[in-house]
Amino acid sequence: MAPGVGERVRAHRGRFLVLGVLRPTLTVALLVTAYYVLPLGDRVRGGGAVFLAAGLAVVTAVVVWEVRAILRSPYPLLQGVQALALVVPLFLLLFAGAYHSIEQVRPGSFTGALSKTDALYFVVTVFATVGFGDITPVAEAARILVTVQMLGDLLLLGLGLRVILTAVRHGRDRAEKTGGDDDRDRDLRARDDR
C-alpha cells in the first residue's frame, strides 16, 4: 500500500527541515575543520594583504552566489539560513587566519602569541563586540587589520544581512506567486489520485 498524500507531503517537508538544520551545521563544521587543517603562517609571508583581499573577494562572490540561489530556491528561508551559515563563518575564519598568520610572520603583533584557537577566539570577540581585552593588537599592522575587520563586521551585519534577508523575502514572494509549496503538495496529491 502506497503512503498517503499527507504522509508524503510531511516527509517532503521533513526532509527539507532536516536539510535546513543539517546542511548549515555541516557547512560550519567543514569550514572550521579546513581552518585548523590548512597550513597558515609562513606560507602567507609577504602576501598577507593579497591573501586577505582575495579572501574578501571570495566572501563577496559567495554572498552574490547565495543571493541568486535564495531567489531561485523553492525554500528561500532554508537557503537563507544556509547562506548565513556559509558567509559568516567564512568571513570570521578568513580574519582568524590573517591574525594567526600575522602573529607567525611578525611575533609580538598581539599581546600574546596567537595559536589558531586564540586567533579564532579573538576574531569572535571582535565580531561580537565583546572585546575582553585579554588579546589586543600591539603592532600597527595588527591594529589596521583589526580595524578592517571591525568595518567589515559592520558591513556584514548591516549590508550583508540585509541583502540576504531581502533575497529571502523576494524568494518567498516569488514562491507564493508561483504557488510554491502548495503546487508541490497539489502535484503529490494528483499523482496519488491516479
Image (tube, helix red, strand yellow):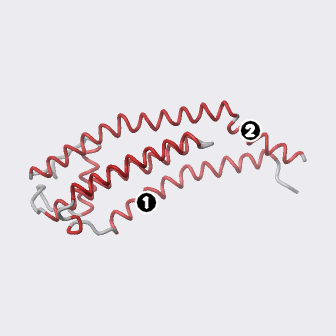
180 relative to 142 in the view: left or right: right
Across and down, in percent, residue 78 comes to 55, 44
Q: In the image, residue 101 lies at what x, y percent?
A: 21, 62
Question: Residue at (21%, 54%) from the top-left corner?
Answer: 49
Q: Residue at x 12, y 62 (%)?
A: 106
Image-quadrant location for residue 109: bottom left
User: Image check: 36 left or right of 61?
Assistant: left
Q: Which mark is residue 194?
A: none
Looking at the image, residue 55 sits to the left or right of residue 193; the answer is left
Disc 1 target residue: 29
Q: Amino acid at mark 1?
A: Ala
Observer-side mark, 1 or 2, equals 2
Circle 2: element type: helix
Q: Which mark is residue 183?
A: 2
Q: Whole-percent x and y of residue 88? A: 38, 47
Q: CA distance from mark 1 to mark 2?
A: 35 Å
Q: Amino acid at mark 2?
A: Asp
